[in-house]
Image: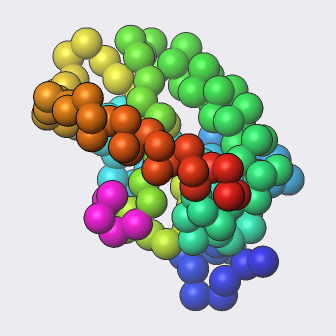
Amino acid sequence: MKKDDCIFCKIANGEIGSDTVYEDDMFRAILDLSPASKGHILILPKEHYDDLFELSDECGERLMATAKKVALAAKKALHADGINLVQNNGEAAGQTVRHFHMHIIPRYESDDKTMVAWTPHDSDPEEQKQIASAILKEIKEL
């Protein structure tokens, strides 16, 4: 399914031009117009999924193989020192376009290292057990 009002659907399906670095029957990978670093790439499925939770299993499996291929090519072509794969789901997580997409962000030793970061907190062993138990219960029900 494609959404007529989705800009990423239009880009992924070639209706809007982009600097495409990879394309196959399922994905288009493009250079981000507002890059976090030189060579920042977005992988866009050609079918519309709002987020990870709508993504088909087949698309998810092929996505990782595609991400690996594109990330390796970007790392080599740009002489990057590392790569971040970033994927946000929901506004609270930083998703700004409601079309599933994965960011491939080449990283360089000279980068601002605060882009993908969090403040580590101490964990409570009892709370950790409760959290693990709740997640395991939900997994069994899927």
Q: Quadrant of residue 33?
A: bottom left
Q: Quadrant of residue 84?
A: top left
| Left or right of 127 in this view: 83 | right
Q: Position of residue 76 (x, y in %)?
A: 55, 14
| Left or right of 26 in this view: 79 | left
- State the residue at coordinates (66%, 87%): 4
Which image quadrant: the C terminus? bottom right
Q: Say whether residue 52 is visible.
A: yes
| Left or right of 81 in this view: 112 | left
Q: Main secondary structure of the magenta part?
A: helix
Depicted 79 relative to depicted 98: above or below: above
Pick whichever, 122 or 18, lies toward us: 122
Q: Position of residue 112 (x, y in %)?
A: 16, 28
Pick whichever, 113 or 58, lies toward us: 58
- State the residue at coordinates (29%, 64%): 92
* Figure coloring: rainbow
| Left or right of 98 in this view: 26 | right
Depicted 22 relative to depicted 17: above or below: above
Q: Say whether residue 116 is visible.
A: no
Which image quadrant: the N terminus? bottom right
Q: Position of residue 64 (x, y in %)?
A: 68, 36
Q: Position of residue 70 (x, y in %)?
A: 63, 31
Q: Which residues are magenta?
A: 90-94
Name the outermost residue toward the bottom.
Answer: 4
